[in-house]
């Protein structure tokens, strides 16, 4: 599976845990889970706690308050989440599970990325399992590193915008841009171009990341609805419709990078609104009796026959 997708089983953790408070700090997700975790064997990594469901939680302490970083399938992933938070909270000299490469260009890029975001934003990325995607997006905008150029394996990020292949186009219907907050993806295109993970097949869905032409990342939940037997993009779609002023009949194009990252792209092509031509309006006693476009009035004559109800005023 490419880096543009996030399994819904991991993404759901961000919603199962209470939102980040304005002060960032809060207690554990539940006192019961914390009590049960004490009965489980401890982790060999710093900041990692086992969960009753067999997964692994990550946490860090700041000013004697615990900050929950999310739940992960693998113990190493939870340890990496702690390391990321530790570097942001305590700087490059923080004690981490995995030794950071301070003299590596990639480490320098990540350090700049961490410093350019608040602690609240980094924690939110970790909880939603979007940190790596955001970091890769930052690297693409920054360009290739010195290490990439020296090794001769540079992905040539400066040309990434031109290295895309069109997957398919979808003309949106009234229901696609209505209140249902979903875009129906034709079955043949969905099964050919989008991931078909277990979460999608079982109806749980997964999160797909798309990048638009301006470099903005859009996240949609990609699911299969058994009720209608259709593949759909849901969560986040209504915002995309609103921000791009999409209407029925507009075309949405889906693309993918030809590079190894297989980044997905989305491009909205809204049609211009109908042209409004100025008109001449002829009124008789306050009632419109003629409406002709500009330039069509030459050679048009009106013969008005007074009725009994019309008052004839004769000159004195």
Image (cartoon, rainbow, N blue to C red):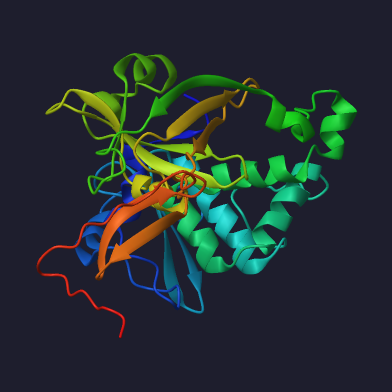
The residue positioned 29% from the left and 24% from the top of the image is 198
The residue positioned 48% from the left and 70% from the top of the image is 61
Spot occupied by residue 279 in the image (x, y as percentages of width and height)? 43, 54
308 shown above or below 262: below
For residue 161, what is the image quadrant?
A: top right
Residue 94 visible in the snapshot: no
221 shown above or below 31: above
Report the side of 105 relative to 190 (left or right): right
For residue 181, what is the image quadrant?
A: top left
Q: Residue furthest bottom?
A: 316
Instruction: Return the residue nearer the eye: 174 or 218.
Output: 174
Image quadrant where one finds the C terminus: bottom left
Instruction: Return the residue nearer the eye: 208 or 23.
Output: 208
Residue 120 visible in the snapshot: yes
The residue positioned 27% from the left and 38% from the top of the image is 174
Q: Residue furthest front?
A: 316
């Amino acid at each position: 599976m490419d880096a543009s997708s996030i399994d819904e089983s991991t993404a759901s953790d961000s919603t199962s845990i209470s939102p980040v408070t304005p002060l960032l700090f809060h207690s554990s997700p539940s006192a019961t889970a914390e009590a049960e975790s004490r009965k489980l064997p401890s982790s060999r990594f710093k900041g990692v706690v086992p969960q009753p469901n067999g997964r692994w939680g990550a946490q860090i302490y700041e000013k004697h308050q615990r900050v929950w970083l999310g739940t992960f399938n693998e113990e190493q992933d939870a340890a990496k989440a702690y390391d990321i938070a530790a570097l942001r909270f305590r700087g490059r000299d923080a004690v981490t599970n995995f030794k950071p490469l301070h003299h590596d260009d990639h480490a320098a890029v990540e350090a700049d990325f961490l410093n350019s975001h608040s602690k609240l934003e980094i924690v939110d990325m970790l909880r939603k399992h979007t940190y790596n995607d955001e970091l890769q997006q930052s690297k693409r905008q920054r360009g290739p590193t010195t290490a990439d150029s020296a090794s001769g394996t540079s992905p040539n990020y400066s040309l990434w915008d031109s290295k895309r292949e069109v997957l398919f186009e979808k003309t949106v219907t009234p229901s696609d841009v209505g209140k249902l907050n979903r875009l129906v993806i034709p079955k043949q295109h969905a099964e050919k171009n989008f991931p078909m993970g277990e979460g999608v097949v079982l109806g749980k869905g997964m999160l797909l990341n798309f990048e638009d032409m301006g470099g903005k990342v859009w996240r949609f939940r990609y699911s299969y609805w058994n009720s209608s037997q259709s593949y759909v993009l849901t969560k986040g779609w209504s915002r995309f419709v609103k921000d791009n002023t999409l209407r029925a009949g507009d075309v949405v194009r889906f693309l993918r990078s030809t590079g190894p990252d297989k980044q997905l792209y989305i491009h909205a092509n809204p049609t211009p609104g109908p042209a409004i031509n100025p008109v001449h309006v002829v009124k008789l006693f306050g009632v419109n009796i003629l409406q002709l476009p500009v330039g069509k009035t030459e050679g048009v004559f009106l013969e008005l026959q007074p009725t009994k109800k019309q008052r004839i005023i004769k000159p004195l």
